[in-house]
Amino acid sequence: MRVYIQKPRTIKGWLGPVNQPDPYARPDIAKGAEYCREMMVGIVELGMPIADEAVFTHNAKGFGELLSWMAIGARSVEDQEHRIFASGSFCAVGMKNGTTGSIEVAVNGIVAAQHRHHAAWEGYQVETKGNPYAHLVLRGGSGGPNYGVEHILEAKKLFEKHKVRNPAIIIDASHDNSRVAGAKVPTQQAMVVKEILALRQVNPEIRKLVKGFMVESFLKEGSQKIESCTPKTIDRGGLSITDPCMGWDSTEKLIKEMAKYHG
């Protein structure tokens, strides 16, 4: 389950509950950290593995041991600090392609994350062990979607060129892979998933490489803008305040359809 407590921004905007637990109040990082950890622990204790995106690497001390999966985002994948952070992570890390759609940038990040590094961490010189389970997340880019056969095979060639261990791809069905006429359409995510599942049925190479999907899902379909609402009018009943999401019913339907392709 995506339990993203930090939100990257192209320019500006709400940075997530770890910085500002109430988007209408002043930022309060101490309160945000307490709120986010309590939320994460509660979900983990229910038996649900959780994921977060490493936007602020210094937050790891408070949350890192709770994660089963972590993303290095499109804006961070070229950053040396994030690559070293992934190298020292205890969980599998998905490296997203950059905002331009470049797959090679992400594969370079994977190679860096799979190797050892020396770095300063909390006042000590440390050596990371390298993360053998760093892998690729295809999320589309400014040039359009990048989950097609040609993109997956391009990634395969780069994996082979760089001798990437445990080559694997996750398809992000949202972001630039879900754009229609320039706008993200949450229902398009189901189409992306179904296209790839169909390809896996007929193409052994794709079946071997594509290990799963990311979808943006919440209780209600769509999204709302913080700046267009007030504390009294904002919908707090499960409507996204960031990216457009699939609703609960359509998510449940998609998961059941995906199960038919399992095996």
Image (cartoon, grey):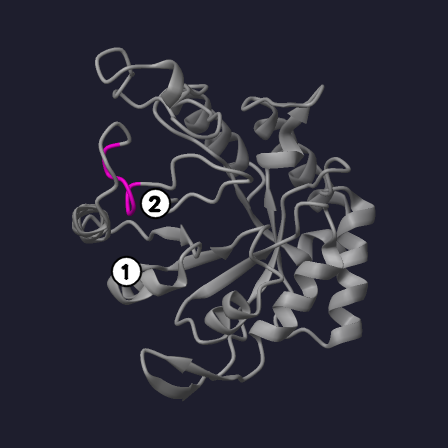
Q: Does the magenta stretch include residue 119?
A: no
Task: Look at 32% across and 78% down and name the residue there.
Answer: 122
Q: Is residue 252 left or right of residue 236?
A: right
Q: Give the range drawn in magenta.
A: 17-22
Against 256, residue 122 (above or below) is below
Q: Residue 63 carries which label?
A: 1
Q: How crowded is mark 2: few (under 14 residues within 10 Å), some or many (20 or more)?
A: some
Q: In this view, does 86 lie to the left or right of 208?
A: left
Single out the residue that lies furthest toward the top: 233
Residue 97, image x and y in percent? 65, 52
Q: Which mark is residue 3?
A: 2
Question: Secondary structure under badge 1?
Answer: helix
Q: Is residue 232 left or right of residue 185?
A: left
Is residue 169 something that shows in the picture?
Answer: yes
Residue 164, image x and y in percent? 68, 73
Q: Residues within 10 Å of mark 1 (few under 14, many from 20)?
A: some
Q: To which quarter of the image does residue 11 belong? A: top right
Residue 47, image x and y in percent? 24, 51
